[in-house]
Image (cartoon, rainbow, N blue to C red):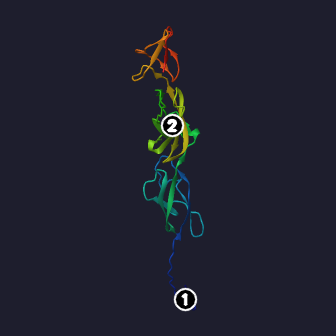
Amino acid sequence: TLPDEPFDGQEIQISYEIKNSPITVGDQKSITYDGKEIKGTDADVDYAVTDSAGNILTKGDNGYKITFDKTVKDAGTYTATIEGTGAYSGTVTKDFVVSQKEIKQDDVTSTKDELNKLYVKMDDQTWDGEALKPKPSVVSYAFDADTIDSIADTDYTIDTYESNDKVGTGRVTLTLKGNYTGTITQDFTINKGNIAAAGNTVEVYRDKQWISAGTLTGKAASGSVETLTAASNAFIYF
């Protein structure tokens, strides 16, 4: 404030302080899990930040910077610090959310490392007379050639099985969790079992009588009847 006196030609010294403009921080830009570590300097990591006049600021030496309280990678909620830089001041703490990646049925593949697909490998099964409940041997998501994300069995649940009690094609339903979300299905092949496998009990009907099966090889489905050899009149029942 200048003194309220007539100017007398003397030099007047005025002291003043230039204060930085405080920042205001709004909503976070949406981020989805992508298998990589996320840093405050990444282009996609951002908030709506303005100065006291409502002007939109950008990250950098004269705007603001973003830092995290710990390494950010997995889906979840973290703490971000947004701090004014250059001509801008103030420090604001905000939640930073990494959303789960949503997987739909069309995203599922049986081809290993197919880009932008969830690979679910189901090994072929051999029918043994009981309902089969196999688990996937591999589950992974290929974000790019350098980022193949292996998904542990703790990051999905097995909900149901279908057509798993006979030779043919079975189906398993999985619900993803952790870094992913969604419910998907994958098919698996059930091959015919070996009737001579250890522990199997079989009987052969030949010439109007039941006889000992002995050592037999062949394949049959539950409740089916198959000829042992093309030349024989023997059938196997089980």
Would you place residue 123 above or below residue 31 in this image?
above
| SS at mark 2 in the image | strand
Would you place residue 136 above or below residue 180 in this image?
above
The answer to which quarter of the image holds residue 71 is: bottom left
Q: CA distance from mark 2 to mark 1?
A: 78 Å
**Residue 40 seen in render:** no
The amino acid type, in three-letter code, at marker 2 is Tyr
Q: Residue furthest left?
A: 198
- Judging depth in this view, the residue of 156 and 85 nearest the camera is 156
Measured from the top left, where is residue 90 in percent x and y?
A: 50, 68
- Judging depth in this view, the residue of 187 and 30 nearest the camera is 187
Q: Are marks 2 and 1 in contact (CB under 8 Å)?
A: no
**Residue 125 seen in render:** yes
| Mark 2 crowd level (few <14, some 14–19, many ≥20, 10 Å Cα) | many
Q: Residue furthest front?
A: 209
Residue located 49% across and 56% down the image? 77
- Judging depth in this view, the residue of 201 and 87 nearest the camera is 201
Residue located 45% across and 53% down the image? 72
Q: Residue furthest right?
A: 54
Position of the N terminus, as image quadrant, is: bottom right
Measured from the top left, where is residue 214 in percent x and y?
A: 40, 14
Residue 119's disc number: 2
Q: Looking at the image, is mark 2 or mark 1 earlier in the sequence?
A: 1
Look at discs 2 and 1 and give the one toward the viewer: 2
Measured from the top left, where is residue 52 in percent x and y?
A: 57, 70
- Classify residue 69 as left or right of residue 30: left
Task: Give the total of numbered labels.
Answer: 2
Residue located 53% across and 57% down the image? 46
Residue 23's disc number: none
The amino acid type, in three-letter code, at marker 1 is Pro
Q: Which residue is identified by label 1? A: 3
| SS at mark 1 in the image | loop
